[in-house]
Amino acid sequence: MNIDKILKFFVPKDHSFYPLFEEDARNLVKATELLKLLMSSSDQEDHERIYKEIKDVEHIGDQITDKTYMQLNKSFITPFDREDIHELTAHIDDVVDSINGVSRRICLYKPKHLMPVYKEMSEMIYEAAKEIEICIHCLNDAAANKDEISKACSNVTRIEHKADEYYYVAVAELFDKEKDAAELLKNNKILEILERCVDEEEDVTDTIKAILIKMA
C-alpha cells in the first residue's frame, strides 16, 4: 500500500466534489431531455429554439467542469483518485458537447426529414443519462451502493449495444434508399454523432466501474 492510500485512511476526504458531480449529472439529463424534444419536432423554428436551450445547458456544463477542475487543484485529499475525477468530469462534458453538436448540425443542415431512428436513439441517450444519474448519486457511498451502481452501469452497456444495432441498420437503410447525395451526407453525420453520444455515456460508466474497483 503506497503512502497516498495510507493517508486516505487518516485524513478527512474533501466531500465538496459530490455536489458538483450531482449537478453535472442533472445537467446531462437536462441536455438529453432537450435532445428528445428536438427530435420529436419537424419544425425548423422549434429546432432553433431548442438548440439555444441546449447551448445554454452546454455552457452550464462547461462551468461545472471548470469548478470541478479548480476544486481538484486545491484539494489535498480527494474522495477517489484525481485522474478518475478528471476523467469522469471530462466524459460527462463530452456527452453534453456531442448533444450540442448534433442539435447544431440539425439546425445548420436542415435535413428534409428527421429519420424516425433519431427519436429512438435520442430516447436511448436519455435512458443512459438517467442511469448515469443513478450512478453519480450512489457514489457518495459507493461501498454501500456497489450493487446499484453496477446494475446501472450494466444498463448503460446494454443501451449502448442496442444503439449500435439501431445505428448500423439505419446507416444501411440510408445508403440503400436515399438517392439525394446531400441528404445522405447530412443524415449519415447526424447518425454518427447520435451513436457517439451513447459511446461517450458508456465511457462515463467505464470510469465509474474503475472507481469501484479501486475502492474495493
Image (cartoon, grey):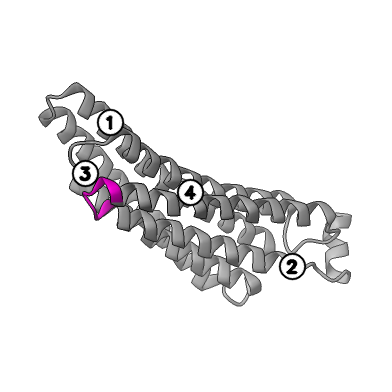
Which circle's residue, 3 or 4, is located before the other in the chain?
4
* Residue at numbered disc 4: 55
Mark 3 vs mark 4: in front: 4
Q: Earlier in the sequence, mark 1 or mark 4?
A: 4
**Residue found 38% across the figure and 61% down from its top:** 33
In the image, the segment drawn in magenta is: 39-45
For label 4, the crowd category at 10 Å Cα-Cα, with few meaning under 14, some 14 to 19 and many 20 or more, is some
Q: Is residue 153 visible?
A: no
Work out how far the residue at label 3 is from the one at label 2, CA to CA, in angstroms. Answer: 42 Å
**Tags 3 and 4 touching, CB below 8 Å:** no
Of the two numbered discs 1 and 2 on the same chain, state the one appearing first in sequence.
2
Question: Does the image show residue 210?
Answer: yes
The tag on residue 16 is: 2
Q: Quadrant of the N terminus?
A: bottom right
Judging by the rendered image, the residue that carries numbered circle 3 is 114
Mark 2: amino acid: Ser
Image coordinates of residue 38 in percent, x first then y, are 31, 53
Residue 197 in the figure: left or right of residue 174: right
The 10 Å Cα crowd at callout 1, few under 14, some 14 to 19, many 20 or more, is some
Mark 2 nearby-residue class (10 Å; few <14, some 14–19, many ≥20): some
Point out the tag, 3 or 2, that comes first from the N-terminus: 2
Q: Circle 4 — which element?
A: helix
Residue 42 on the magenta span: yes
Identify the mark at residue 186; answer none if there is no mark: 1
Q: Position of residue 83 (x, y in %)?
A: 71, 48
Q: Residue at x 20, y 43 (%)?
A: 115
* CA gap, disc 1 and disc 4: 21 Å
Tell me which corner region of the image, top left, top right, bottom left or bottom right, holds residue 64: bottom right
> Mark 4 or 2 closer to N-term?
2
